[in-house]
């Protein structure tokens, strides 16, 4: 999957640099982005509804299961706010990028649409890096920091790309927790991103 992401990004850069795509087509790209965003969010809902086993496991956890995704989001945004003092971008831009929670495809496209290509590219690369780091470090984090830290690490990605490594590291014990955490993170991405853009 990662190789296709890198390939697509490289092709996009080359097409933009050499102006391969005609300007009259570029004017309609925002419509294509809107459709892609709707399809992505639709897929999240369908994936959640299709996983019946996860529903039963979540019910067994009760309301306490909600503490992890919300504390994970607060932690991500809090650290990003502090990081804004050391970065060459404003705090609303930093918060908007961090609100992608690892969902690079949606956050990059949405910020490109709402705030311009510079911030969209930043969100894409930052959230892609978060997903890659989470994917590579799941086993180490689980071994030294425990179950909840492992799930919080992936953010929105724990419902798809990092779900497999998390299930493998925990021998299946964290499947429902990871899935629900990823879904809740994903649902908040299209809500929080436009919120921070208003302060730009």
Image: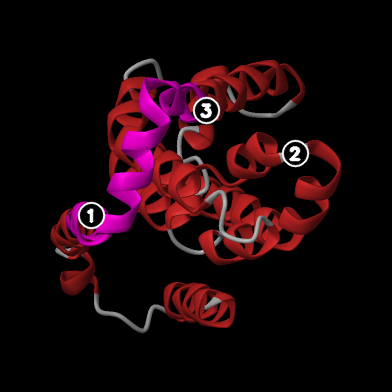
Residue beneath disc 1 = 37
Q: Quadrant of the C terminus?
A: top left
Choose between 51 and 193: the one closer to the eye.
Answer: 51
Examine the rendered structure and indicate whether residue 135 appears above or below residue 180: below
Q: Please, what secondary structure does the residue beneath circle 2 have?
A: loop
Choose between 123 and 165: the one closer to the eye.
Answer: 165
The answer to whether residue 122 is magenta is no
Compute the Cα span from label 1 to label 2.
34 Å
Q: Are marks 2 and 3 in contact (CB under 8 Å)?
A: no
Residue beneath disc 3 = 68
Query: Can the viewer see residue 116?
Result: no
Residue 146 tag number: 2
What residue is at 70 percent from the left and 16 percent from the top?
82
| Range shown magenta | 41-70
User: Where is residue 185 drawn, in percent x and y?
Assistant: 41, 37
Q: Please, what secondary structure does the residue beneath circle 3 have?
A: helix
Q: Are marks 1 and 2 in contact (CB under 8 Å)?
A: no
User: Where is residue 16 drawn, in percent x and y?
Assistant: 43, 72
**Is 181 on the left or on the right of 189, as rendered?**
right
Q: Nearer the viewer, mark 1 or mark 2?
A: 2
Compute the Cα span from label 3 to label 1.
26 Å
N-terminal label among 2 and 3: 3
What residue is at 63 percent from the left and 25 percent from the top?
80
Compute the Cα span from label 2 to label 3.
13 Å
The quadrant holding residue 170 is bottom right
N-terminal label among 3 and 1: 1
The quadrant holding residue 72 is top right
**Is 49 on the left or on the right of 7, as rendered?**
left
What residue is at 67 percent from the left and 40 percent from the top?
147
Examine the rendered structure and indicate whether residue 52 appears above or below residue 15: above
What residue is at 46 percent from the left and 33 percent from the top?
99
């Amino acid at each position: 999957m990662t190789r296709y992401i890198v390939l697509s990004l490289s092709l996009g850069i080359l097409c933009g640099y050499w102006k391969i795509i005609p300007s009259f087509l570029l004017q309609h790209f925002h419509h294509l982005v809107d459709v892609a965003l709707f399809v992505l969010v639709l897929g999240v809902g369908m994936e959640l509804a299709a996983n019946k086993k996860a529903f039963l496991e979540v019910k067994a956890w009760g309301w306490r299961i909600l503490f992890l995704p919300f504390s994970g989001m607060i932690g991500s945004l809090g650290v990003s706010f502090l990081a804004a003092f050391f970065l060459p971008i404003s705090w609303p831009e930093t918060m908007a990028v961090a609100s992608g929670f690892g969902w690079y495809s949606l956050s990059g496209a949405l910020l490109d649409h709402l705030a311009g290509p510079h911030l969209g590219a930043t969100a894409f690369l930052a959230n892609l890096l978060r997903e890659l780091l989470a994917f590579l470090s799941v086993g180490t984090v689980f071994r030294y920091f425990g179950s909840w830290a492992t799930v919080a690490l992936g953010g929105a990605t724990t419902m798809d790309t990092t779900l497999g490594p998390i299930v493998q590291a925990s021998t299946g014990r964290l499947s429902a927790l990871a899935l629900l955490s990823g879904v809740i993170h994903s649902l908040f991405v299209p809500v929080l991103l436009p919120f921070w853009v208003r302060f730009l």
